[in-house]
């Protein structure tokens, strides 16, 4: 195949430099806000590529990043894969041991590091003898003693590399099945699992996420990227903006809800992407200070990575006219699989807004090129009737075929191309998928299943509740019983009897939690999801 016909990132990610040369990135690292136009993004990537070639980087080499969302991280995001090497974003919230355990497989030669994370990178280089270069991304370091690092490792300044390197003349032509990035799951379920994405899978995925029936991204949008670029390739939003010429606002490290609200208003953001815990906090902050932030420009936000509550979707809709597009995905799916806007079909558009909200609350339809199925415990296909609940399997254009370095969970990749997601779901007769629970979070009481997610959604809608998690407590008689762990909204109170009475409207008594534990805050994972592993150890063992 002629290289021009291949699905290569370089054909897609730099399109904005041609079609929207005056738009670009608004990057807000601690050393000050910076606008980088799309042609400059391309120029910087080409300069960085030359610097990496000078270090002998070859196709297939792995190059890590340890950084937040900013323009310097974007340089590596575009330059590394387009050079034919493999981009490997490291989750900055992992502890040193977790990082080392991932790098023992990926053996990255270079690490691009945010200036604020240099201590961690130096400790990492100490433990990983294959690291040759650390590139410090930040303001130019003031003169003084350079930080001490293991011998054999150089520390370079990112901006200086760009200044002293000429742009690479031509990008190479890898094969479209060549790996362009590797990402590891955040470890909600234990040891990180690393997945490889190819040029082909990332191009197809990036083309799909912006579609009208997905998130309607266009060159007229300004997108605030809250989802970290170090997790699941930032859902490919950097590449989607580079493809379409949308303005991309990169907030760096500080993601407090008040700051996000300031950014949404100041940069006239039209759309944004984050996990539901972030949107819950943003909604609570804007509601607590009426009149302080006007979200008039914000049209729609994507909430994914965990289940949203109906009250969050309704709150954005009714108080701010903002549509919440619910998305479901996983690292193994590059990562987006479904998007659920307020209405997809003519039939849905004609529905009453509250009926639409019911559909928005479910994960929705797969993106074009992906297929969803459900099966019972014996592997028999279940009907798409909205009521049958079973193991969720996904197959299609950008579903991974394996873990890059193996893992006991590798059995979930079927020889038939289907990935057992580990989630439990139903699919209705319009192809709308609803996640009913994570397989391992389902609670088995007296031989019957209780969905922790269904209880969390119901309890999360109580006005007194800020965040809620439902976990299983071992029980001699029933095997497991549900326990609710709740953080309460300021000034509110809640007791077990009230909780059980209210739940009784929609749940059987045996499905309701046996206990209510009030906590100041619910622990979150490094990607902002409820950390059930920690909750189980803290309260139940
Ligand atoms: P992990 O959370 O295992 O570290 P991922 O970030 O890849 O890794 O998360 C994938 C999982 O997150 C899915 O299998 C699912 O359980 C959960 N998830 C993602 N999006 C949603 C959603 N919209 N609703 C419910 N669960 C979700």
Image (cartoon, rainbow, N blue to C red):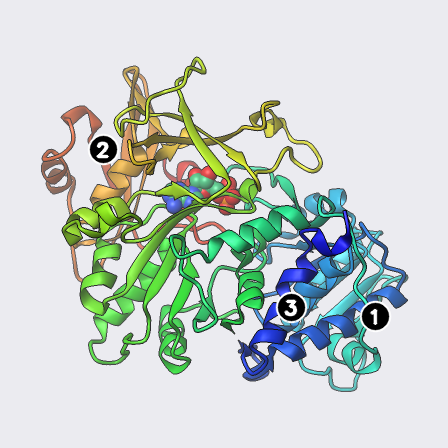
Query: Of discs 1 and 3, which sits in the foreground?
Result: 3
Ligand 1 resides in the quarter of the picture at top left
Task: Assess whether mark 1 and mark 2 are in contact (beta carbons under 8 angstroms).
Answer: no
* Residue at disc 2, secondary structure: loop
Label 2 crowd (10 A; few <14 / some 14-19 / many >=20):
many
**Ligand 1 contact, mark 2 (Cβ < 8 Å):** no
Q: Earlier in the sequence, mark 3 or mark 2?
A: 3
Q: Which residue is drawn at 48% across and 71% down?
A: 219
| Residue that label 3 marks | 14
Query: Considering depth in this image, is 124 or 462 the residue closer to the camera?
Result: 462
Residue 308 pos. (x, y %) = 31, 49
**Ligand 1 contact, mark 3 (Cβ < 8 Å):** no
Label 3 crowd (10 A; few <14 / some 14-19 / many >=20):
many
Query: Considering depth in this image, is 490 or 429 the residue closer to the camera?
Result: 429
**Ligand 1 contact, mark 1 (Cβ < 8 Å):** no
Q: Which residue is drawn at 47% across and 49% down?
A: 525
Query: Considering depth in this image, is 468 or 290 the residue closer to the camera?
Result: 290
Which mark identifies residue 513? 2
Alpha carbon separation for disc pair 1 and 3: 17 Å
Query: Considering depth in this image, is 199 or 147 the residue closer to the camera?
Result: 199
151 is higher (above) or lower (below) than 443: below
| Residue that label 1 marks | 50
* Residue at disc 1, secondary structure: helix
Residue 394 pos. (x, y %) = 49, 33
Alpha carbon separation for disc pair 2 and 1: 59 Å
Query: Of discs 3 and 2, which sits in the foreground?
Result: 3
């Amino acid at each position: 195949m002629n290289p021009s016909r291949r699905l290569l990132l370089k054909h897609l990610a730099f399109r904005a430099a041609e079609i929207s040369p005056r738009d670009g990135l608004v990057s807000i690292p601690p050393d000050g806000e910076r606008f980088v136009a799309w042609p400059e993004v391309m120029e910087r990537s080409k300069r960085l590529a030359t610097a990496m070639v000078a270090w002998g980087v070859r196709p297939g080499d792995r190059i890590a990043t340890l950084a937040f969302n900013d323009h310097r991280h974007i340089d590596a995001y575009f330059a590394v894969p387009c050079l034919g090497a493999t981009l490997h974003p490291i989750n900055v919230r992992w502890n040193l041991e977790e990082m080392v355990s991932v790098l023992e497989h990926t053996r990255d030669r270079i690490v691009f590091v945010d200036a604020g994370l240099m201590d961690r990178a130096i400790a990492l280089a100490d433990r990983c003898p294959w690291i040759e270069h650390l590139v410090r991304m930040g303001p130019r370091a003031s003169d003084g003693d350079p930080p001490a690092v293991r011998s054999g490792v150089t520390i370079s300044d990112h901006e200086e590399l760009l200044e002293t390197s000429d742009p690479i003349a031509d990008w190479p032509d890898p094969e479209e099945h060549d790996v362009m990035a590797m990402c590891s799951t955040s470890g909600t379920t234990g040891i990180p699992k690393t997945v490889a994405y190819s040029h082909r899978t990332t191009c197809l995925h990036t083309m799909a996420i912006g579609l009208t029936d997905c998130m309607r991204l266009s060159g007229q949008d300004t997108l605030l990227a809250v989802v970290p670029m170090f997790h699941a390739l930032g859902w490919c939003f950097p590449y989607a903006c580079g493809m379409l010429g949308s303005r991309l606002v990169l907030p760096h490290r500080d993601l407090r809800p008040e700051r996000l609200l300031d950014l949404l208003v100041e940069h006239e953001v039209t759309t944004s992407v984050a996990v539901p815990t972030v949107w819950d906090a943003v909604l609570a902050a804007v509601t607590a200070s009426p009149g302080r932030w006007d979200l008039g420009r914000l049209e729609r936000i994507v909430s994914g990575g965990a289940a949203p509550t109906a009250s969050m979707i309704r709150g954005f809709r009714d108080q701010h006219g903002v549509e919440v597009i619910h998305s479901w995905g996983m690292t193994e799916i590059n990562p987006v699989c479904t998007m659920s806007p307020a209405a997809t079909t003519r039939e849905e558009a004609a529905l009453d807004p509250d009926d639409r909200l019911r559909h928005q609350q479910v994960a929705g339809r797969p993106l074009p090129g992906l297929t969803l199925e459900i099966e019972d415990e014996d592997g028999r296909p279940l009907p798409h009737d909205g009521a049958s609940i079973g193991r969720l399997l996904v197959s299609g254009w950008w579903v991974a075929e394996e873990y890059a370095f193996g893992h006991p969970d590798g059995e979930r990749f079927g020889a038939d191309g289907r990935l057992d997601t580990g989630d439990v779901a139903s699919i209705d007769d319009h192809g709308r998928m609803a996640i009913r629970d994570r397989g391992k979070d389902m609670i088995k009481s007296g031989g019957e299943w209780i969905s922790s997610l269904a209880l969390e959604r119901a309890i999360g809608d109580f006005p007194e509740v800020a965040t809620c998690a439902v976990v299983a407590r071992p029980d001699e008689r029933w095997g497991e019983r549900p326990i609710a762990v709740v953080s309460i909204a300021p000034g509110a109170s809640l007791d077990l009897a009230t909780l059980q009475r209210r739940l009784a409207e929609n749940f059987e008594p045996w499905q309701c939690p046996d206990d209510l534990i009030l906590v100041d805050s619910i622990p979150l994972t490094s990607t902002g999801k409820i950390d059930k592993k920690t909750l189980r150890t803290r309260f139940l063992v």
